[in-house]
Image (cartoon, rainbow, N blue to C red):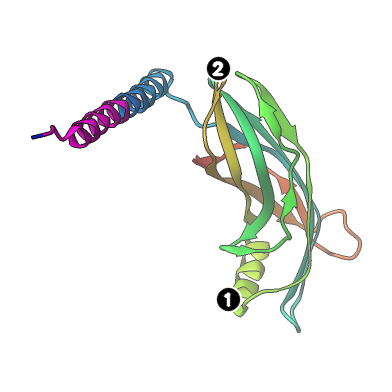
Amino acid sequence: MPKDCGNHNSYYRHKLYGRIFACFLSLIILVLFIILVIWLVLRPTKPKFLIQDTSVYQFSLAYNTNLLSTNLQVTISSRNPNDRIGIYYDRLDVFAEYKNQQITAATELPTGYQGHNDVNIWSPFLSGVAVSVSPYLVDSIGQDENAGLMLIYIKISGRLRWKVGTWISGHYNIDVSCPAFLTVGNDNVNDGSPVFRFQQISPCSVDV
């Protein structure tokens, strides 16, 4: 009776394919393990942001229509504290927020690579013309101006990538919140409009 060589050939082919697949899977696991070990050893630290200045050129509220017009310039610095890890900023949008309500349009910051321990400084203009605000926000603005102190948050949102040697990670979201403490007065202004003065350099909270 003739031997069934076809079944034997099929068996050896399946066995060979299984070995190739196992080797390929082991290689992938090894590469991922090496990347994980490098990542844990280097332990990337989040970039550090500081708000250095805030100049308010306009902050006027039309009480009859609840429309707020804002024009300001902020100076923000970012430092990469890592000795072996670079950062690619792929998108950064900055805007002003008061009492959890956005009061200016988002302004795009210059993006690019930030090397080890490098510092970037941005001074964007932020503006919001005739932004409709809620009645409770109108009351808060009046109370803060009477108290002589106002807190505005400068927010940055975007995406970044980490660079370790020649390896570059995938995208990570970054959210930055910078408190800008302002004193409010009407001195030295003929029309009695409020004057805002930035108080101090403040660190920002950073989530990645």
The residue carrying mark 1 is 136
In which quarter of the view is residue 191 placed? bottom right
Mark sitting earlier along the chain (2/1): 1
In which quadrant is the N terminus drawn?
Answer: top left
Residue 201 makes an appearance in the image: no
Residue 91 x %, y %: 66, 44
Q: Is residue 130 above or below residue 99?
A: below
Indicate yes or no whether the magenta region holds residue 78: no
In which quarter of the view is residue 7 placed? top left
Which dot marks residue 165?
A: 2
Instruction: Pick whichever, 123 or 31, lies toward us.
Output: 31
* Residue in view at x 58 percent, y 76 percent: 136
Q: In this view, does 43 lie above or below 180?
A: above
Callout 2 crowding tier (Cα within 10 Å): few <14, some 14–19, many ≥20: few
Residue 100 makes an appearance in the image: yes
Cα separation, mark 2 vs mark 1, equals 51 Å
- Is the stretch drawn in magenta largely helix, strand or loop? helix
* Residue in view at x 66 percent, y 40 percent: 90
Q: In this view, does 82 lie above or below 2?
A: above
| Secondary structure of the residue carrying numbered label 2 | loop
* Residue in view at x 34 percent, y 22 percent: 30
The amino acid pointed to by label 1 is: Tyr
